[in-house]
Amino acid sequence: MFNQRGFSLFGIFFLVAVVVVGGTAFYFASRQKSSGKKLVGVTKQSREQCDLKPKPREFSLAPYYSGPLVDAHVHMPIASRIVATVAKQFGFEDMPVLEGELSPQNLFCLFESEGIKQTIGFHMLSKFSPSTGHIEQMAKNYPGKFAHFYLPPPIHELLISPAETEAIITQPQGLFRGIGEISFEKGTFTRASPFDQPFSDLIEIARKHKLVVMIHPAASHQDEIKKLATQFPDVTFLLHGGQEQEWIAGLLASHRNLYYSLDANMTSLYGFERRHDSEPITKEQWLAFIRQNFDKKVQEATSKWKAKIEANPDQYVWGTDRWYGWQFDYEVGGLLEEFARSLVGKLDPAVQQKFAYQNAERLLGQ
Ligand SMILES: [Zn+2]
């Protein structure tokens, strides 16, 4: 989600300093290995090796959608433990690493158990950890299961230059399907406009290579998003945001190259009280909250979105916005899935599959 909770300027500078020092070693190490590091436990028989059964339902809302899903918004755990440690120390609420419980194989099995046929996954690559080896390996081991996006870290000093970005994300051809999430609510991006450098260059790269651009605009970016959609009619933009960005829904009818994902906001995955702005919500708090409020939250989402989805049925997609380590937990994932299926069940049967997976597939050019 990349929520509002910023980090202090001091934190950013310290983060940059530590990453520069610590990251340099990693940078050279990762550069020497052309295809990145080996990830444990990944084999071709990945599906047969999954022993996760679908989590039984806890609620009984009906009608219930039981078809395929595409999760259109997932922040993938990152490959560099150094970057993860430093990032957490200096402001990111969590930065899980792609290993152990969160190995690609375990993520694959988790999403399989939830009936998710494909996941749009955002991979943060920085100036000091630009290797795509782990992503190439996932693409090879799980063909068609992940649509990989390049996520620029929301700190200008850590960004890969546009020229290098173009080289990285277009080699090998077709590895990346998009650029994003570009969050204008996080880090030093909060002071930027999508028309500033390097964002305009990134959008140009996306246009040239037919990549989707995923943006979390600032609350004040309504004119900028309208202008982007108009100036780049051949670029597909996937947008989302919190309550401050619900104006996006109003732009869909007049701009067919805009898509909007409904995700963490509906499920309060990043908090349900003011205190969660400064104190990240825990797994136990979220599980207790969603279990107490499940029917009410589905009803709330239905009242808010059903008519809007049905009015522009080709431009809404569903996502979870998982990011923190605990958000990839089996119980958490099962409840997010049950929430999605309960909500989809409330929609006109003619639009259920569109929202659940077909729009996401079209967005990805499938
Ligand atoms: Zn976001």
Image (tube, grey):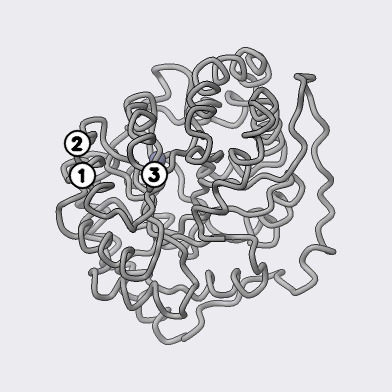
Q: Residues within 10 Å of mark 3 (few under 14, many from 20)?
A: some
**Where does the image place residue 287, in percent across and percent down from the top left?**
64, 25
Q: Secondary structure at mark 3?
A: loop
CB under 8 Å between callouts 1 and 2?
yes
Q: Residue at x 37, y 25 (%)?
A: 277
CB under 8 Å between callouts 2 and 3?
no
Mark 2 vs mark 3: in front: 3
Q: Residue at x 28, y 75 (%)?
A: 164
In which image quadrant can residue 100 be found?
bottom right
Mark 1 vs mark 3: in front: 3
Q: Amino acid at mark 1?
A: Lys
Q: Which residue is mark 3?
A: 256
Q: Quadrant of the C terminus?
A: bottom right
Task: Report, in whole angstroms, how far the alpha carbon at label 1 lies from the one at label 3.
Answer: 13 Å
Q: Quadrant of the N terminus?
A: top left
Q: Which residue is mark 1?
A: 227
Q: Residue at x 64, y 62 (%)?
A: 104
Q: Residue at x 54, y 28 (%)?
A: 310
Q: Residues within 10 Å of mark 2 (few under 14, many from 20)?
A: few
Give the total number of marks visible in the rendering.
3
**Between 308 and 178, the one nearer to me in the picture:** 308
Task: Report, in whole angstroms, how far the alpha carbon at label 1 lies from the one at label 2.
Answer: 6 Å
Q: Which residue is mark 2?
A: 223
Task: Report, in whole angstroms, how far the alpha carbon at label 2 lies from the one at label 3.
Answer: 16 Å
Q: Secondary structure at mark 1?
A: helix
Q: Amino acid at mark 2?
A: Asp
Q: Amino acid at mark 3?
A: Arg
